[in-house]
Image (cartoon, grey):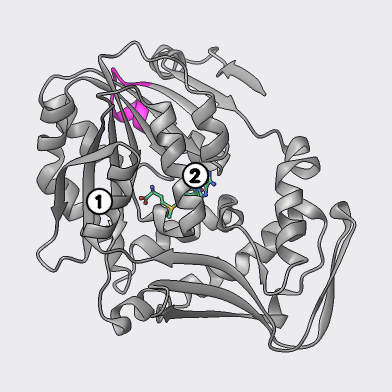
Amino acid sequence: MTLFHAASNKVSSQNTVETRLKIQRLLEPTLVVSLSAGSDVIKGLTQTPKFLPPRYFYDDFGSELFEQICALSEYYLTRTETAILQQYAGEIAQITGSCELVELGSGSSTKTRILLDAYYQFGYSLRYVPIDVSAGMLESSARHLLTDYPTLQVHALAGTYEMALTHLEPTQFPTRMICFIGSSLGNLNPQECDVFFSQITNTLEVGEYFLLGVDLQKPKHLLEAAYNDSQGVTAAFNINMLQHLNRQFEGDFDTTQFEHWAFYNETENQIEMHLRSLRSQTVQLRSLNLNVHFEAGETILTEISRKFEINFIQQELKAKGLVPQTVWTDPNQWFALLLCQLQP
Ligand SMILES: C[S@@+](CC[C@H](N)C(=O)[O-])C[C@H]1O[C@@H](n2cnc3c(N)ncnc32)[C@H](O)[C@@H]1O
């Protein structure tokens, strides 16, 4: 792990940004190869059926593609959650007051700006702690925020949710809010979700907050359109995971020999995104010392995106002591934002 304050030999307006920015890298590239990242790839590609953790979508190019997905007309999630935040960010700020805002999977922090604006409007001071596995996107978003919000302090953590939550320092602010928006909870299966909620509970002090954005159940055609957009951006995002693995693990995936496949599994209430092998082939990941054989038509599950019922998710949260104080939704009830408070 390294900790550094970005270099400060620039002009004075830049200095202000540099002194307000702290970046902590929890994943060193060399460690990524030799430790946790490699082992999850080996595990996923040696099981039947094969799977890969969705965090491998997010190299720099994957993060850019995700931003393009957010702007697609079929991808209702971002605009719906944005509208909810625009309507209720003021209420959120009034409930928590001045706080340390920790965001898991912050990406471009675009929606976070709505929250920051609301806190500043009420004159509340803030410290922002974005956490993301995509280090390039994390740093560039932090710098843009610091330029646009001249009194903001940012302590960015580059790493996985699990690692970063264990590296949070005690807050100097009256309270803390961990924010997990963008429907990312849906990427966790029920067991992972259970472990994740326990980690949130263990990280927060009693009385502190958890803001969660979840996608809700809706007609299948709307869901399937969102993950099979007409411009093929989601397909490119899915395929890019193989490029990422090629780079990171000296792989030789031929990306022209896999195709994107996404559908709604109505039994599990989840979108499943797969990569399907177009022929019988063997792929090598040299730095992992791994050869993987694919039959023609065989798939790798790259993401689930669970779609929730509000009552169900409220019960799950309550069972962990994360008691929903307010639940906001949109007129179609497509998406929900839950503000929970940790109770003893
Ligand atoms: C679906 S995007 C959401 C981005 C943003 N929060 C939003 O609402 O638009 C998920 C983000 O989480 C990051 N991410 C995915 N898995 C992660 C993990 N296990 N640990 C940390 N960050 C992760 C990705 O790099 C990406 O920026």
Residue 164 left/right relative to 252: left
| Disc 1 to disc 2: CB gap under 8 Å | no
Q: Residues within 10 Å of mark 2 (few under 14, many from 20)?
A: few
Q: Between 125 and 319, which is closer to the camera in this rendering?
A: 319
Q: Residue at x 44, y 38 (%)?
A: 198
- What secondary structure is marked by label 2? helix
Position of residue 46 relative to residue 11, above or below, is below
Which percent across, then down, holds residue 60? Answer: 57, 50
Residue 171 left/right relative to 113: right
- What secondary structure is marked by label 1? helix
| Residue 164 colored in magenta in the image | no
Q: Quick check: can you spot residue 105?
A: no
Magenta span: 143-153
Residue 158 left/right relative to 226: right
Say what amino acid the circle numbered 1 marks.
Gln
Q: Mark number for residue 277?
A: none
Position of residue 92 relative to residue 220, above or below, is above
For residue 141, what is the image quadrant? Answer: top left
Q: Between 331 and 10, which is closer to the camera in this rendering?
A: 331
Q: Which residue is mark 2?
A: 195
Q: Residue at x 23, y 39 (%)?
A: 323
| Residue 146 colored in magenta in the image | yes
Which percent across, then down, holds residue 29? Answer: 72, 38
Which percent across, then down, holds residue 31? Answer: 76, 36
Which percent across, then down, holds residue 237? Answer: 53, 66
Q: Residue at x 60, y 51 (%)?
A: 59
Q: Which residue is mark 1?
A: 314
Quadrant assignment for the C terminus: top left
